[in-house]
Image (cartoon, grey):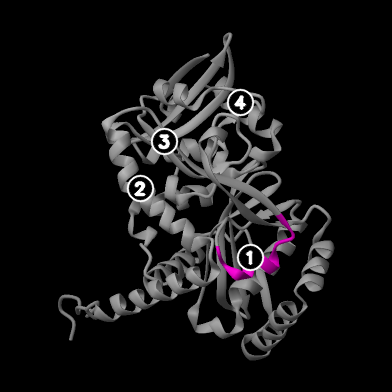
Amino acid sequence: MKVTVIRPGDLGQAEVARWRELQIATPSLDNPFLSVEFALALGRLRSYVRVAVIEDHGKVVGFLPFERHAFGIGKPLGSWLTTCHGLIALPDLDIPARHLLRACGLSVFAFDHMVAGQTTWEPHESAVRPVPMMDLTGGYDAYIGHVRASSPKNYKTVRYKERKLAREHGVVHLDWGAAGPDAMRVLTGWKSDQYRRTGRVDRFAQPWIVELLEEMHASDSPSFAGVLTMLYAGDTPVAGHFGLRTEKTLVGWFPAYDPEFARYSPGIMHHLHMAEQAASHGLGHVDMGKGGREYKGWLKNGTTHVTEGRVSRPSATAAVHWMGRTPVNKARNIVVDRPSLYRLADRLLKGFGRVRTSLQPATVEKEPSGAR
């Protein structure tokens, strides 16, 4: 097989069409983070983004979008920012991972959200993780019927809180496909505040991520689009989400809510309304992403899988990478696999976030020149 490494912007029209054709042909690739539009957008914003074009007897049989960093360290496209990565290829493509790394000029390639079942990566997988899904293929009524039957107490509690929110603040309704920058600024403001409160890194402190969201928000085609949804009580926004969709699947990306309304559980309320609207817009699945949030357990009625692993070729870079990453990843997996440890770690991070926030100096507004 021949492997050619190029920048996403150098893909020709025929290659872009072939990428879409391969993605549509394989159900496990129905994820917008695997779409060519996402690779093209990241390629415009990040200089280290590459695409390996794989050919067999002159015919393109696969693509691997990836990041090539210093010292031959490879990462999946979007790495820590996305929830799915993999080869966009024929289902029976069998190209050894180390051969692919050599052709890409990489010494090591670590992944944690790889599409499960891809022959290239299976020998190097260290864990398989479930991804909770809201399966809407039977319609919203069938989905909500499952939720009511499997988690009756949780469902009744959320609906009670929704009625209470409506009485106290106005009719609860969802705006699907919210346009304009104002709603996005509200959502990212909530999310930045959440990152700080929970001890996480604020992704929106990086201008290129803000620019990426703006570009994705403006994308709107039958096979790929950004979808901003906002839940309102009367005229007041209380929760929202920005994600990406293909023709059939919406993938969760940035959910957030106004902490002033936390007692009403607006995030879960939003997910139920979002599922209803997703079904009405012809979508069959909402991918909530892997992770230990308890609400996903009772909102899901389906599951897919992603894998974690690491591939390397003999080199000093690979050895240093192993020493720096593998022990940390093993410790993280121990925490993730044990709910009690996960909750403890979450509380510790939130405590750190509160301390960090309290130590930040208060912002003092300066009067404009000439003000009295």
Between circles 3 and 4, the one closer to the viewer is 3
| Label annotation for residue 327 | none
- Residue at horizontal 18%, vertical 86%? 372
Question: What is the secondary structure assignment of the residue under circle 1?
Answer: helix
Alpha-carbon span between mark 2 and mark 3: 12 Å
Q: Nearer the viewer, mark 1 or mark 3?
A: 3
Q: Residue 236 in the image: x percent, y percent?
A: 56, 79
Q: Nearer the viewer, residue 163 or 76?
A: 76
Disc 2 marks which residue? 325
Disc 4 target residue:
17
Q: Position of residue 52 (x, y in %)?
A: 47, 25
**In the image as oriented, which residue stretches furthest toward the bottom?**
168
> Disc 1 marks which residue?
296
Task: Looking at the picture, tell me which residue is in the foreground, 72 or 287.
Answer: 72
| Sooner in the amino-acid sequence: mark 1 or mark 3 | 3
Toward the viewer: 165 or 1?
A: 1
Q: Is residue 173 magenta?
A: no
Disc 2/disc 4 C-alpha distance (Å): 37 Å
- Proximity of marks 3 and 4: CB atoms separated by less than 8 Å: no
Q: Is label 4 in contact with label 1 (beta carbons under 8 Å)?
A: no
In this rendering, which labeled residue sits more in front, label 4 or label 1? 1
C-alpha separation, residue under disc 3 versus residue under disc 4: 27 Å
Q: Earlier in the sequence, mark 3 or mark 4?
A: 4
